[in-house]
Every structure is written in structure tokens, then in C-alpha cells.
Amino acid sequence: MEKVKIGLLGMGTVGSGVWKILKTNRDEIIRNCGYEIEVSKILVKDLGKQRDVDAPDELYTDDFEDILSDDGIDIVVEVMGGIEPAREYILKSMDAGKHVVSANKALIADHGKEIFKKSKSKGVMFLYEASVAGGIPVLSSIRESLAGNRVEEVMGIVNGTTNYILTKMAKEGVDFESVLKEAQDKGYAELDPTADVEGYDAAHKLTILGILSFGTDIELSSVYREGITNIQPIDIEYAKELGYAIKLLAIGKDRGGDIEMRVHPTFIPLEHPLASVGDVFNAVFLKGNAVGDLMFYGRGAGDMPTGSAVVGDIIDIVKNRNNIYYISNSRDEKLVKPMEETVCKYYIRIMVKDKPGVLGKIASKFGKNNVSLSSVIQKGRKTPTVSLVFITHNSREGNIQEAMEDILSIEEVVEIANLIRVENGVDE
């Protein structure tokens, strides 16, 4: 059986999954691509570290040159993470004529344009299915099965940690900090959870989705980002009462002009498919102008799901390396719409002193700033402060923010307790 040799950069969670799948599913892989895929070298930082895989000691190296200089290695698989030296290793591998597979979402979001350009100039393939939503084959579906569509919208739950936290808060009525600690204890959240709970991880993934879906260069810095740390149990209760769930969504929209790219907590109707996606699961909802609505659902992380996506890319390269195709990411030049120009509905919870006339004063501020109200709920009586909850009609973000500033000037207003955007409302 003819072999294709790969160099594996990293033997952490994803690298271990790749190794296990190549061994466990050897016969299926041979049937699918006609070759045996063999790991020839494994780059690690610490040669003495104990690992829970049965790779022979002679495969390990701590010198990247051992992989780069090996002409027998056709494909380099980067699963080490981080920006450097991963970026350097990928570019050098391409210079050496080696195809590359990566699971590195942060690197692709920050340096994808440079890597795509190098891939094309050197005549090698670069695939990165595992960088978004783990084992869910959403990128290959956009690239291949949906190639005859113009993608109009992509909206997804692409971070399992935040989805677990919000699901737990909704089911048990507990606060954010308590659930975060539990998620850390179970290994669902890092000791420093900032990348997840502040939306950075989702923004990286949305950037990659947007580049591929909308066929244009997108800078990570142009993606609006807001995390879930301000979500309170009371907001989740109001959401249920109003017929919504709260999810951290990565949202990209192309209406034929500028595109929207934003990550933030979102009210989404309970009947929407994304509303029922719970715990650590991921899902991507996509709208094509020909195919209509689609949703991809599955595990977005873990050694085997993510390893599955990596191995899928390896097989794709093995089957196509003699007839190389390129992934165009710059068919058009589209600008990302400034967040203040975004139009959607809003949930706004305001804490006020319980005095006559305060609702009228707030309503007038909304009207002054061209914000139309759909509904108002008041909770609490005979207490020093009460909640006023507003749902707006479609409104411009800039007008909403100006209205918030004006409302804060009202003497009876204690605070703007929360502002959450609403997607897929009835008049959108």
C-alpha cells in the first residue's frame, strides 16, 4: 500500500485525536483515499513529557528542521496553536512545497490573507476545517456543496464554553460567576476564560466564516465583539417570558452591499433552531440565496471531533494534491458595516426609581432619537427601584446608543442594567 507521510506539529488534545483516528480508522481511510496516511515526525516542545498515545519515541522531535528538511513528508499538520512559531512553520512548509492543514483559528483570523497568498504562489493546498466548530463540516460545505450559492447570512453558536454557561443559567436560574466556576471545574472553561466569555474565540471563528462565506478579505479588528459577563438570571427570565432564548451568536450578513460582522449576546426566538442548541454543542445556521436555510450541528471541540476535521482535510489533500484547487477569499471587495449603522431590535432593561412620570420621560427620549418601542414591561412595586423592560422595533444602533445617553440624564434613572440585541423578530 502506497503511503503519504505527514509531519505533525503538536501532540496536545487535537494532535492526540489525529493520531488516534489515523490508527483506529486506518482501513476506512485507505478505502476513502487509496493511500495509507503515516505520521513520519511529531514536533513537540518537551521530549520527556508523558503522553496518553502509543506513538513510538523515535517519531518525536523538538526541532522543526527535522520535518522541514524531510522530502518524504508531503503534508504538515499544524495543531500546536498560538500565532508564533505556528505562522513561521506554516509559511516555511509552503516554501518547501509541502501542503498544510491547520486547526489554528486565531492564526487564520489574524494572518489568513498572508497564508492564502503563500499557498497559491507555491502551488500547495491549505485547509483549515477544524478551525471553526470542531468536527462540524461547515467550511467544506460552504466551499464545495454551496459553491453555487451566494451566502446571505451565517449565524452560529461557535463557542461551547459560553453556550454551556448560558444553558446552565437558563435551566437552573443561577448567576454567571457560579456557572463559570463549575465550567472550570469540569474542564469546559480555562482558568483564564477571557477568550471565551468575552467573545474573542467566537470573533476569530466568525472572521474565518465571513472570509469564506462572503468571498472578501475581513480584518478581525472590524468584527464587533461583546461577551456574556453582563448577562443576569433576570435577563434570561425576561427572555423566556417574551418568547426568546439568550445565546452568544456570531453573526455575519451580506445583503449585497456592506456586510455585518458581529459577536454578542442575542435574544433569539424559542422556535428558531439555534435556540434549542444546548450545553457545549455548536451549531451554524446558514442562508443561501438558492438553497435557503441550512443548519449544521455537532460537537465544536474535543480531541476526536476536532481530530476528525483535521483528518478529513488530510484526506482531501491526498485526493486532490495532483489537481490542486485554491480557496479564493477575495472575489469582491466589501466593507464591514460600522456597528453604529447596524439595524435590529433591542431588549433594554433600565432600573428606575418608582416615581410617577418616569416611563413617559424615558419614552420621550426614545422618540427624540427615532427609536420606536414595540413593548414595555414593568416589574416590581413598592420598592425603591423597579425594572422597566423595553423591546424596540428595528432601530439603528447609533440611535439606540444616543438614546441611552439621553436616558441616563433623567434623574429617576438609576442605571441601564442591560442592552441585548434581538435577531429574527417578526417584522424583520
Image: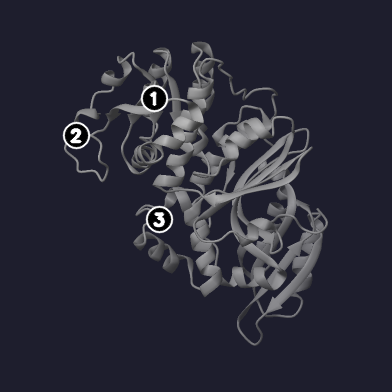
Residue 362 in view in this figure: yes
Is 179 above or below relative to 405?
below
Estimate the x, y position of residue 6 in percent, counting from the top left. 36, 25
Estimate the spatial distance between the alpha carbons at disc 2 and disc 3, rounded to whole Å. Answer: 27 Å
Mark 2 residue crowding within 10 angstroms, few (<14) / some (14–19) / many (20+): few
Estimate the x, y position of residue 396 in percent, counting from the top left. 75, 49
| Label ID, residue 47 | 2
- Residue at (54%, 40%) from the top-left corner? 205
Estimate the x, y position of residue 2 in percent, counting from the top left. 39, 20
Estimate the x, y position of residue 9 in percent, counting from the top left. 34, 30
Residue picked out by circle 1: 76
Amino acid at dot 1: Val
Q: Quadrant of residue 21?
A: top left
Secondary element under disc 1, as helix, strand or loop, is strand
| Label ID, residue 189 | 3
Estimate the spatial distance between the alpha carbons at disc 1 and disc 3, rounded to whole Å. Answer: 29 Å
